[in-house]
Image: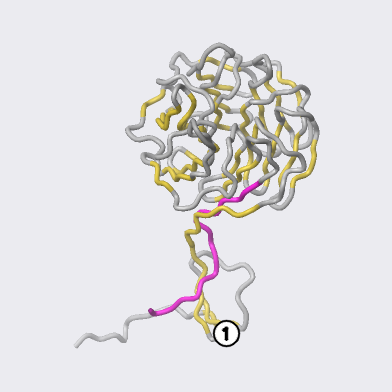
Amino acid sequence: MVAYTGIKGQNILIVSSDPANPLEGQIWYNTTSNLLKGYANVVTNAWASGGALNNARQATAGFGTQTAAVAAGTAASPFVLTELYNGTSWTASGALTAEQSYAAGAGTQTAGLVFGGGYPTTVSTTQSFGGSSWTNVPATLNTARINLGSAGTQTAALGFAGYTGTANTGATESYNGTAWTSSPNSMNTARRNIGSFGTQTAAVAAGGEITPYVGSTELWNGTSWTNNPTGLNTTRGYVGAAGTQTAGLAFGGYTGTASTAATELWNGSTWTSNPTGLATARFIYNGNAGTQTLALAFAGEPPTTATEEWSGTVLTTRTITTS
């Protein structure tokens, strides 16, 4: 016979109302509802409507998080407008010092960067954002271009791919907060309008516009690009994207014949299609922010004020049952 007298458990908290700020993994018994509850991860993987932009826009550079994002510039008047998102609504902020539509963005709402872009002429300009105003940075990209990809932060950014005005490029440059340095190793496939995310030393480039559009994915290790064996399930360019090299998200875009709402999750080696996509199918240039579990999609083409919030895996209170 097995003796159980030495086995010890842990008491479950008994409360009349659910804790206001539970810890992950915490379990309690609610005497009011007579239910056993816990606080744990729940996979949602769905988009929900967020606060609308004050101005419909396209070709917008975006960066930050789901609750602290920046939308900078647009291809229509007011070209230099900047808006800030607080998780609920957008507020007008200090304008760009000069138009940089079709540009790339990186960083946070209080320490951001916009570089490249321009219309109708490509530019190599770089501007930094301090949370309320923009400042021209003396450093310029070595390759002026529009519709480029980006990753990283204000002081450790990466710019790659794009269109020079005459051809696609795979040129890759790193920014250290002072100057841009060209890498001797370009992307394996020159392209523009790609989905991009990650850090200066661990970035991802997915999809893009060549002729025709592609779904191929490349990984950057800080020195060179490597072709990933598999690409996006929905071939497209103008892709919105967010996350890290091991946990990313791609959404929206253009397939070559129509806008798409398709959303896919990246695990570091493969893309998985999500059953539901954006509510508003659209081209997305560089208007995105956040992570694989908490992303933000905003602006797009045709010009729109639409903002959507992505919830992946989220912590929430759940009822625990034995069935």
**In this rendering, is residue 229 above or below 6?**
above
Residue 228 placed where, x, y %? 36, 31
Q: What residue is drawn where x is 60% and y is 39%? A: 288
Q: Is residue 202 visible?
A: no
Residue 89 placed where, x, y %? 74, 50
Q: What residue is drawn where x is 62% and y is 80%? A: 17
Residue 300 placed where, x, y %? 63, 37
Q: Quadrant of the C terminus?
A: bottom left
Q: Nearer the viewer, residue 208 or 316?
A: 208
Name the amino acid, label 1.
Ser
Residue 153 image-quadrant placement: top right
Q: What residue is drawn where x is 49% and y is 54%? A: 45
Residue 22 placed where, x, y %? 58, 68
Q: Main secondary structure of the magenta part?
A: strand
Q: Judging from the image, what secondary structure is the residue with disc 1 in? A: loop
**In this rendering, is residue 48 above or below 106?**
below
Tag 1 residue? 33
Give the residues in magenta.
307-323
Residue 126 image-quadrant placement: top right
Residue lying farthest left? 1
Q: Residues within 10 Å of mark 1 (few under 14, many from 20)?
A: few
Residue 210 vs residue 148: left or right? left
How many marks overall? 1
Residue 31 vs residue 79: left or right? left
**In this rendering, is residue 83 above or below 317?**
above
